[in-house]
Amino acid sequence: MYEMLARAKPFIPKKTPITVPQIWLDGKYVGGSNQLEKFLK
């Protein structure tokens, strides 16, 4: 995901915030992609 953001950043205006999506499963907050990987193990 971070690689994708790095590739997209040149096309987005400089003042536009880029955030990592929040992941929720069954109504519970998991976190970002790193936490999802740990959650699924």
Image (spheres, rainbow, N blue to C red):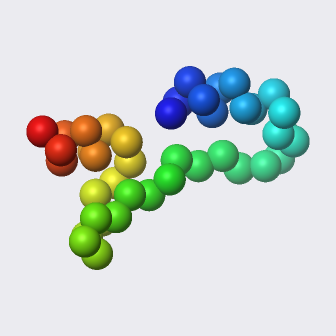
Q: Which residue is found at the position 38% from the left and 58% from the top?
A: 23
Above or below, comparing residue 21 to residue 40 in the picture = below
Q: Which residue is found at the position 60% from the left and 29% from the top?
A: 4
Number of disc labels: 0
Image coords of residue 39 (percent x, y): 18, 47
Q: Which residue is found at the position 81% from the left and 28% from the top?
A: 10
Q: Is residue 1 left or right of residue 4?
A: left
For residue 24, which quarter of the picture?
bottom left
Work out which quarter of the rendered image holds the C terminus and state it.
top left
> Between 16 and 1, which is closer to the camera in this rendering?
1
Q: Which residue is found at the position 82% from the left and 39% from the top?
A: 12
For residue 37, which quarter of the picture?
top left
Q: Is residue 34 left or right of residue 14?
A: left
Image coords of residue 20 (percent x, y): 52, 47
Above or below, comparing residue 30 to residue 35 in the picture = below
User: As drawn, which residue projects farthest toward the left?
Assistant: 41
Image coords of residue 34 (percent x, y): 32, 38
Q: Is residue 32 left or right of residue 16?
A: left
